[in-house]
Amino acid sequence: MIERAAPAAPQEALAAALTAEYAAIYAYGPIGVRLTGAARTAARQAEAAHRGRRDALVTQLSTAGATVPADRAGYALPYPVTDRASALRLAVEVEERTAAHWRAALAATTGRDRDQALDALLDYAVRATRWRKTAGLTPVTVAFPGRPV
């Protein structure tokens, strides 16, 4: 997984968010194969949302002439995904970590970029809450989504 660093400029913040999107997409592969039914459908939808944001960021950064970070062939997961419980736990963590990158982008961006960061933060906070509920984890919500603990 990708650790968050405090970016100094708007394009750096968006590039960091893009790197988090890459990692999230990668993680949903092992997550999805351990889920069935509605949870698997939710994982597919989550991966599609991360792919959509990835694609939009690649276009946005390219158009602005910014450096687009390259995707990696693979990412280290924080633990093995061996069953439904570990898949759901990882889904929560993926959404929380990605939200943290977008939360960091809030401080570095303005205007439409800031709106984009807020939309992503809210989307991932809601999705993490849904994953916590599906997994039976408590508390279901957190006071400050995307905030490092």
Image: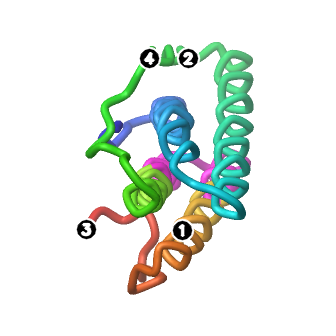
Q: Report which quarter residue 64 is drawn in.
A: top right
Q: Which residue is mark 2?
A: 68
Q: Nearer the viewer, mark 2 or mark 4?
A: 4
Q: Please tell me which residue is depicted at 50% across the width and 56% down the height of the picture.
A: 95
Mark 3, secondary structure of its residue:
loop
Instruction: Note whether residue 9 is visible.
Output: yes
Q: Which residue type carries mark 3?
A: Val
Which residues are the magenta region? 98-118
Real-space Cα separation, disc 1 to disc 2, in angstroms? 30 Å
In the foreground, 119 or 44: 44
Query: Could you say where residue 82 lies in the image, as x and y percent from the top left?
Result: 36, 48
Residue 48 belongs to magenta span:
no
Secondary structure predominantly adopted by residues drawn in magenta: helix
Which residue matches tag 3?
149
**For the residue labelled by badge 2, is the local secondary structure a helix, a strand or a loop?**
loop
Q: Residue at x 55, y 17 (%)?
A: 68
Left or right: 148, with 71 as reference point: left
Please state which of residues 88 and 122 is positioned toward the viewer in this rendering.
88
Residue type, mark 1 in image: Trp
Report the amino acid beneath label 2: Val
Q: Position of residue 130 (x, y in %)?
A: 59, 73
At 35% from the left and 37% from the top, the residue drawn is 2
- Per the image, the residue denoted by label 4 is 72
- Which callout, 1 or 4, points at the residue further toward the start of the chain? 4
**Numbered disc 1: secondary structure:** helix
Q: Which mark is residue 131?
A: 1
Q: CA distance from mark 4 to mark 3?
A: 27 Å
- Spatial CA distance of label 1 from label 4 is 26 Å
Disc 4 versus disc 3: nearer the observer: 4
Mark 1 vs mark 4, foreground winner is 1
